[in-house]
Image: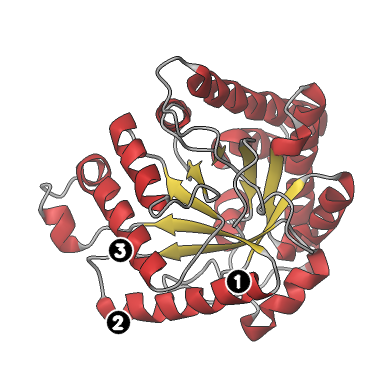
Amino acid sequence: MKKGCGRPLYLLPFDERRPYVSGMFHLDGRLTGRERLRVAESKQLIYEGFKRAVARGVPKECAGILVDEEFGAHILSDAARGGYVTALPLERDDLGEFDFEYGEEFGRHLEMFDPAFAKALVRYNPGGDADLNRRQEACLHWLSTNCRRTCRALMLELLIPPTQAQLDGVGGYPGYFDTQVRPALIAEAVQSLQDAGVEPDVWMFEGIDRPEDCVGVVAAERRGGSTGVSCVVSCRGAEEERVERWLEATGASGFDGFAVGRATFWAAVAAYEAGENTSEEAANFISMRFSDWVDVFDYARARPHAHKGAGHAFGRAFQPLR
């Protein structure tokens, strides 16, 4: 693997499908053509905000989007033509167990859109169901092998859902699980997946509160001298204050980038859909919010006490070998 070129990665993810449709539009079941168009147009609005953030000064070579094919095929194509970093999700988003949205045809969809990253989201707890973990390890190993064979960069988003026993161990409080238990489980999960032959170019983890835990996660992800492998923090659905805290902690601890979705666009899109603002106002809000996250993360990385590992990033991942 090539060594990183030192650039961070600023991702705007808006790849949710069913949760986005039900949460934003209160729609369930099979959508009509008009409903599908409405969802797709809202994602175009998010994309417009992203492009404006780049025009405002977010470095284009570091800026990327994570968007689904179902409602964002046109966005993926336009972003690739525009020279932005793109990531295509491959997982079904309505299952607890990893499975491909398009089954064995996932390779054809990657070829069609040629994203910088093939992206997979997996819910994997090393202390959870052993059979489930083995099935997911096998599936992800197959994906990882395919990406290596086709010189496609792989981004793996790892979520750690707590087991009941783990929750009971912290008095049933999910917040305690997040701060006291989850960081060690992330490191253990990374090692287990690596041992199973899963080799992402980019690991994405949910936000971690304590900088010392961030450093430990980076060390686990880069064990064995894997300096070309990158580490990104995901801020899935968190409120703004917590997003800022996570960006500060990870930016100062060796992480290479972030993915902030809902905290960037949800309020603006919801207000637009409710007729409370214009598309122009919504796009400008998204642009400013995304630029704010870049500033927070960059400031944390630049602080004198920032972890010396910061800056490893995206050799093959930015420019997949073709």
Look at label 1 and name its amino acid.
Answer: Gly
Q: Residue at x 49, y 53 (%)?
A: 203
Viewer-proximal residue among 46 and 318: 318
Vertical relation: 184 (above or below) 212: below
Q: Which residue matches tag 3?
A: 125
Q: Residue at x 48, y 37 (%)?
A: 255
* Element class at badge 1: loop
Q: How is the image coloured?
A: secondary structure
Q: Which residue matches tag 1?
A: 29
Q: Residue at x 11, y 55 (%)?
A: 168
Of circles 1 and 3, which is in front? Answer: 3
Q: Which residue matches tag 2?
A: 131
Q: Which sits earlier in the primary sequence, circle 1 or circle 3?
A: 1
Residue neighbourhood size for the residue with mark 1, other residues' Cα within 10 Å, grouped as few (<14), some (14–19), many (≥20): few
Res. 35 visible in picture: no
Query: On the picture, is 96 further left or further right than 182?
Result: right
Q: Position of residue 22 (x, y in %)?
A: 57, 57
Q: CA distance from mark 3 to mark 2?
A: 12 Å
Look at label 2 and name its amino acid.
Answer: Asp
Q: Position of residue 75 (x, y in %)?
A: 81, 53
Look at label 3 and name its amino acid.
Answer: Asn
